[in-house]
Image (tube, helix red, strand yellow):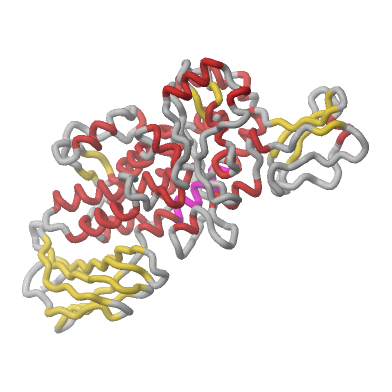
Amino acid sequence: MKIHKTVFAIAIVVGAGRAGAWEAETTHTGLAEQAALASGLHKRLVTLGFSGGLFEPLTIPPADAPALIEDLHLLSPSHGAVPDARGRQTALSWIAAGSGLADVPASHGANHFYDPSTGHGWERPDRGFGDSISDRLREVAGRSRLPAQGVPAPDWISDKSNPFNVAGFVDQYAKAASAATPGERSRHMAAALVAAGAILHVLGDLGAPSRVRGDEAAHLDELGGGPDDLGSRFERIAALAYGRLGVPAPSHVVTRTRLRDYFTAKDGNGLADVIARNYFSPGTLPAPERMNGEVKPHLARPLPALPARLNLMAASRDDGTTLRSADGACLARYRVEKGILRFSLDDDCMLEQVTQILPEVASYETGLLDFLFRGELTITLGQTIAVTGKGLGAGTVEVLVEDNRGVRKSIGTAHSGGDELIHVPAPQSGTRVIAVFRGVDAAGEQIVAVGALPLTH
């Protein structure tokens, strides 16, 4: 498949505008949907009383969140993440909506970078960058007001200026379980899912090599969809090749005990760590090398490492040859021309990388979604209602009883820690009991743990 022959012709169909990430209405939406479908979220929603699970209609009345609804209408209705006039769409669509809104406004896209080798996020290209782009491109870059620096992605998800931060998710999720009426719970759950989708977006962006190797200039390529259509060619290829519905399912589910570890971890197995050491980006390829004696191209980063011996005979052919990873994926092309060894990334090579990377990104996003909605409480009914939980630290537990109208009323709260959380008298009426714990888990991470039990009288 020679995608490079058609990428510019098709790009305008995807949509013009500076691409701040894996493209929001295609790749990001597809990744979020695949993560949700592979996760345990459907079962969790059913437990909480949303009987349709991922396909339960949830409503955020436009009058309650006019700014959110206005932003949602920046997305294309054809991509399945824009609610109807009542503010109503399925739970799965609200997750997709959040994944599409994470870089609105566009300046927030600068907070979706993280280089594990430096700990830095986005840094505006400066020295040497201006010489490599046209006057028109510099003008467009100036109009877009690219910030000098961005908040590193692992920090951005908790940053107070992030409208979809973790604290906001936790607050909305707790209310989605404990609010009094079905309408209130629907609104809060939709808001929690929007925040969860946006957090998935920030993590997913670290699957692009340029975002984790300090290669910001790769995100100001001219992509051909208009004068302002600047972005990453690598990410555009993903959108063209897979769209939304073609994004692959996760190859496995990544499990971590701390939220930040999905992004970057001391053991080197955060998504940013894995991608940074296994792939080149356009601006971090081995430097050109003149063929004088032993050939040892200079590497911008220690990894990926080059083989002990390059195939210079094959590299001297007109088409050069390919540097491949241990599992056979294209890492780069290399060619000897006029006595100089040069490395490059063409569209077909990048497509091989996208094909390998997307299932891994989906695996991390699935694990992160399960992490956000983790926390199981056990309710035992006897003379009293006993609530227990495992792996919890300090926090507050509330027990609610739901009547046949779906209205929930608190029947007891306690500050708790450990496995035994609370005992309350059994209610004389009601259809079921719901327990909600909000606090931290044994690792000190924010958590909302929930449980539900039908009542029989």
Q: Where, quadrant-wise, is the C terminus in this rendering? A: bottom left
Q: Where, quadrant-wise, is the N terminus in this rendering? A: top right
Residue 283 colored in magenta in the image: no
Q: Is residue 293 left or right of residue 199?
A: right
Q: Position of residue 273 (x, y in %)?
A: 58, 52
Q: Position of residue 306 (x, y in %)?
A: 77, 45
349 or 120, nearer to the observer? 120
The image quadrant that residue 411 belongs to is bottom left
Q: Is residue 399 above or below residue 359?
A: below
Q: Position of residue 104 (x, y in %)?
A: 35, 35
Q: Report the magenta stretch's main SS.
A: helix
Q: Is residue 228 left or right of residue 344?
A: left
Farthest residue toward the bottom? 383
Q: Which residues are magenta?
A: 357-367
The residue under the point 32% across, 79% down is 419
Farthest residue toward the front? 127
Q: Position of residue 198 (x, y in %)?
A: 37, 44
428 or 253, nearer to the observer? 253
The residue under the point 19% across, 69% down is 398
Q: Is residue 427 above or below residue 261?
A: below
Q: Is residue 84 above or below residue 37?
A: above
Q: Is residue 250 left or right of residue 67?
A: right
380 or 269, nearer to the observer? 269
165 or 357, nearer to the observer? 165
The residue under the point 43% across, 48% down is 35
The image quadrant that residue 174 belongs to is bottom left
Q: Is residue 47 visible?
A: yes
Residue 359 colored in magenta in the image: yes
